[in-house]
Amino acid sequence: MSMTETQAAKPVVKERADTVALDAEDLRRLRLQRFDRIGRWMLPLAVLILTIIGWDRLVVWNNIPHYILPGPGLVWTTLLQDWAMLLDALLVTLQITMMALAVAVIGGVGLAVLFTQSRLVEMSFYPYAVILQVTPIVAIAPLIFIYVDNRTAGLLMCAWLVAFFPVLSNTTLGLNSADHNLRDLFRIYGATRWQTLRYLRLPSALPYFLGGLRIAGGLALIGAVVAEYVAGTGGIGSGLAFRILEAGYRLNIPRMFAALLLIAVTGVVIFAGLSFLSHMLLRKWHESAIKRET
Amino acid sequence: MSRPERPSLDQRPPVLEMIDVDKTFNGDVVALKAMNLTVNHGDFISLLGPSGCGKSTALRLIAGLSHPSRGKIAWAGGQGENDLGVVFQEPTLMPWATVAQNVWLPFRLRGQPYTAVRDEVLEALKLVGLEKFQNAYPRELSGGMKMRVSIARAMVTKPRLILMDEPFAALDEITRFRLNNDLLKLKEAIGCTVIFVTHSVFESVFLSDRIVVMAARPGRVIREVTVPAPYPRDENFRTSAAYAALCREASSALHEAMGEPV
């Protein structure tokens, strides 16, 4: 990357820091930075370890039976023991989640583009998108499974309903937030509607879309899990939520915990993955990504 | 330095004419009243006036971003594809695109691939002194450098007319002086025609050969001051007696425009 006036200033400051003694304020700032860097990882880790120890002691000292509250050790061994079954279930849930997320992106972005291209369409349909969003999925899901025969299609529809709205609303906001001077410039140069969309509105919307996508990733997982709860049928090809229900009926509480752990970890991984994607796409130019670099 | 003699003002062919143009908003707010302006090829015209005098409105009308309520704007020989380049008060660059991609934009919107116009883009960047920064992103540049990219973009297609709407108003004085000098050099190099909106008397006298002084409520032209000083102009012109006299003249016209005693 070529040097610029602003960046050229940085190395000079650094050089001086090496040769001239740091004053108290600098030292305090450096100490704070180091504390931030380490604390960001160490503190949550310490909380986790303390929680696990506390949980374990609580169970042991009070002699709590494992069908009420299993200790962390038992949950871990159950996770390993039932790994094959739980992994199968996880893959099923993950598949629904990913498909729902994909459809949410296509549907959300497609609808957002349609909305910004035509006021008529937006005015007609936006209120219904909101209504779909605010109606709880647990209330709609039973109906969906009555009318949709294919179980996978039903699950997908539920997860999609939950996930698509943040993509839609964020992308719409992003498409409309293109710089007004740039819009004027495109008009002056006689840009077509398609050119304005492709070269101006879509790039402007990218950071907003990625923000919506991160929310949608978590929501797609929640939607998939809720839908499985409602669908409830077992056998081969059932997801994590069904395994939790099943284990609950059999008072296999350790397995419930193990499955719950898997869902939580999956949610975190999805969020982290999408955050990484967002960072990679924006790191060259967007403020949000630049701050993270330095 | 030998240079072809500039034709005197009335010898240059016209580019654009504003004929008796009115612009009203909501039927009753008169932004511009009976404006007449002939822009000739090679002119550097400043529109000078207090805020609300309609100078930006005039620019938007010429740019075709809004339409006159009355009167007309006539391009000599009709409107074409390559009439305009524009520089706004902000650099107005696309932050996701590199410097070269930003300058490429006017060509790109005409469907010309980068490879076909690379020479023009690099030439424009060279003229504003940023050829080394073609792959930088706007956020890596200082305010003055961003404005240079914006100027390069406006002139890369060599349009018939370049509109500048207070382009240096947000910059510090040192940067503004430097950009004023460079703008004049650029104008000499490519021979463009410019309409420059400003509220700075000094800037308008330094840059232009015609200063159109405007008054507010309703926005209208009250006087035209001709700056007879020859180009190229440099730092010496800024300190000359002629410059001071012209500033005084433009300044008194501006006071008249604001309805204050001189």
Image: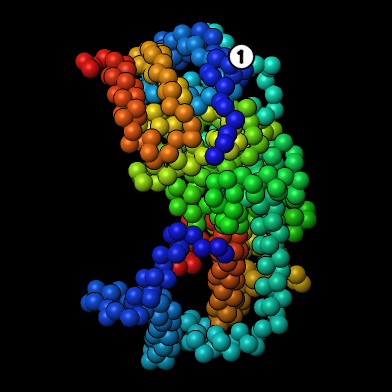
Residue B199 falls left or right of residue A188: left
Residue A209 appearing in the image: no
Residue at (49, 86) in percent of width and height: A72
Colour option used: rainbow
Quickly name the residue at label 1.
Answer: B74
Residue B15: which quarter of the image? top right
- Locate residue B154, reporting x and y percent: 58, 37
Q: Residue at x 58, y 57 (%)?
A: B132
In the image, residue B60 above or below residue A280: above
How busy is the neighbourhood of tag 1: few (under 14 within 10 Å), some, or many (20 plus)?
Answer: some
Give amino acid for label 1: Ala
Q: Considering depth in this image, is A136 or B96 the residue closer to the camera?
A: B96
In the picture, the quarter occupied by the N terminus of chain A is bottom right
Residue A112: percent from the left, percent from the top? Answer: 62, 42
Host chain of mark 1: B
Q: Residue furthest front?
A: B2
Q: Quadrant of residue B106?
A: top right
Residue A156 x %, y %: 70, 56
Where's the C terminus of chain A, which quadrant?
A: bottom left
Would you place residue A272 above or below residue A230 in this image? below
Residue name at image x 69 percent, y 24 percent: B80
